Amino acid sequence: MAVLLFALAAPIVLLLLYSFWTQAGLQLDTRPTLAQYATAVTREGYRTLFLRSVAISSVVTLVTVGLAYPIAYFVAFHVKRAKFTWLLLLTIPFWTSYLLRVFAWKVILGFNGVINSGLLSLGLISRPLEFLLYNPTAVVVTLAHAYAAFAILPIYVSLEKIDRSLLEAAADLGDGAIRRFLRVTLPLSLPGIIGAAVLIVVYLLNQLTRLTPDAKS
């Protein structure tokens, strides 16, 4: 509890206090004011950036969780041996630098990237496709891959903890595979889904809102 209070609660409280203070040069004025909040609400650049960050974070979260759930479900229910090896293989790519993974997608989606080069060599296109990079879709794809591990692991833990006897009881009572999933597996795995979604949304909002209001593109 002491570690949580010191490492989590204290920085949040300090950040909240700073939001009501102002600074002129090197002088910090600790008199409470709502000037910063008024600027954030009234300045168009801040509103645009915040709304865009929320939209991208929401889409990335939905895509990431939607792709991570089948992977976690497969490992939890269909892998009988060497589950640790499967989890290790799933997480190894995320041991590399975040920037390297982002630049890897730039190489894949770029003007002269893997996709364009492959399509050109096959004669399917006459010139590189320009819409693959520098657009919201590319941002969603890149971020969904970057944070996939944050979704796979919590969902896997939630699925692994489900009592298999509940599924057997549902089958004995006449439920098919789909009804067992909708009535037993999905509700019991919601804590993992919610945990993964919260992790991704909070981290993405933290990253995206660090941009300046002038960086609208």
Image (tube, grey):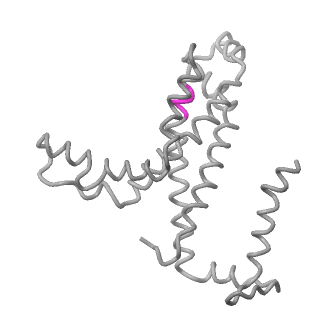
Residue lying at 55% horizontally and 28% vertically, measured from the top left: 88
Q: Is residue 40 left or right of residue 109?
A: right
Q: Is residue 63 left or right of residue 175?
A: left
Residue lying at 25% horizontally and 45% vertically, measured from the top left: 115
- Viewer-closest of 178 and 107: 107
Residue found farthest to the right: 2
Q: Quadrant of residue 149?
A: top right
**Predominant secondary structure, magenta span:** helix
- Viewer-closest of 197 and 190: 197
Measured along the vertical axis of the image, is residue 134 above or below residue 103?
below
Location of residue 135 in the rendering, given as x and y in whole percent from the top left corner: 37, 60
Quadrant in the picture for the C terminus: bottom left
* Residue range of the region highlighted in magenta in the rendering: 69-73
Location of residue 127 in the rendering, given as x and y in whole percent from the top left corner: 14, 54
Measured along the vertical axis of the image, is residue 173 above or below residue 158?
above
Query: Is residue 129 a member of the stretch shown in magenta?
Result: no
Location of residue 69 in the rendering, given as x and y in whole percent from the top left corner: 55, 34
Residue found farthest to the top: 172
Q: Quadrant of residue 193?
A: top right
Q: Is residue 206 left or right of residue 140?
A: right
Residue lying at 79% horizontally and 55% vertically, measured from the top left: 7
